[in-house]
Image (cartoon, grey):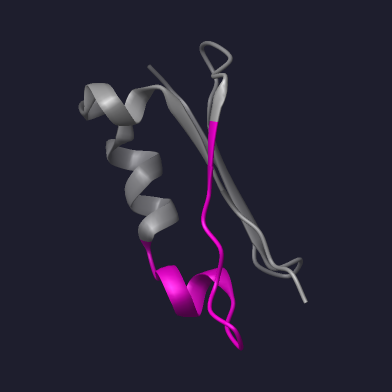
């Protein structure tokens, strides 16, 4: 399985998705009240990009870290 991390720090969002097949499940990580996805979740997007496919439950999901104001 292959994942791709779209890390758009200038636009304040990140997206981790599988590239070998389309997932039908999406996890949305909401940031803190005055934070961004990086200040709230740290390196979780990088971790999921590298390790999600090692865990059967995590394989079924794509991951979005949006910024809402």
**Left or right: where 30 falls relative to 51:** right
Residue 22 image point, x, y percent: 58, 14
Q: Which residue is drawn at 78% across and 77% down?
A: 69
Residue 35 as seen in the image, left or right of residue 48: right
Q: Residue at x 54, y 69 (%)?
A: 37
**Which one is nearer the viewer's eye here, 11 or 30?**
30
- Residue 5: where, in percent of width, then height? 53, 43
Count of all numbered marks drawn on residues in the image:
0
Range of residues picked out in magenta: 26-43
Residue 62 shown in magenta: no
Q: Within the image, what quadrant is residue 44 found in? A: bottom left
- Quarter of the image for residue 68 reads bottom right
Q: Does the magenta stretch include residue 27?
A: yes
Residue 18 in view (yes/no) = yes
Residue 28 position within the rendered picture, expressed as x and y whole percent measured from the top left: 56, 49
Judged left or right of residue 55, residue 31 is right
Q: Which residue is drawn at 32% across and 31% down?
A: 58
Whether residue 6 can be seen here? no
Q: In which quarter of the image is residue 9?
A: bottom right
Residue in front for this viewpoint, 31 or 18: 31
Q: Furthest residue to the left?
A: 55
Identify the image quadrant of the N terminus. top left
Spot the residue most to the top.
21
Q: Which residue occupies the foreground of this view, 27 or 54?
A: 27
Residue 64 placed where, x, y %? 58, 47
In the rendered image of this protein, does residue 17 appear above or below residue 15? above
């Amino acid at each position: 399985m292959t994942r791709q991390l779209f890390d758009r720090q200038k636009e304040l969002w990140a997206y981790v998705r599988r590239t070998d097949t389309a997932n039908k499940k999406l996890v949305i990580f909401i940031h803190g009240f005055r934070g961004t996805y990086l200040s709230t979740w740290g390196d979780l997007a990088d971790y999921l990009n590298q390790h999600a496919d090692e865990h059967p439950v995590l394989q079924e999901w794509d991951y979005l870290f949006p910024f809402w104001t």
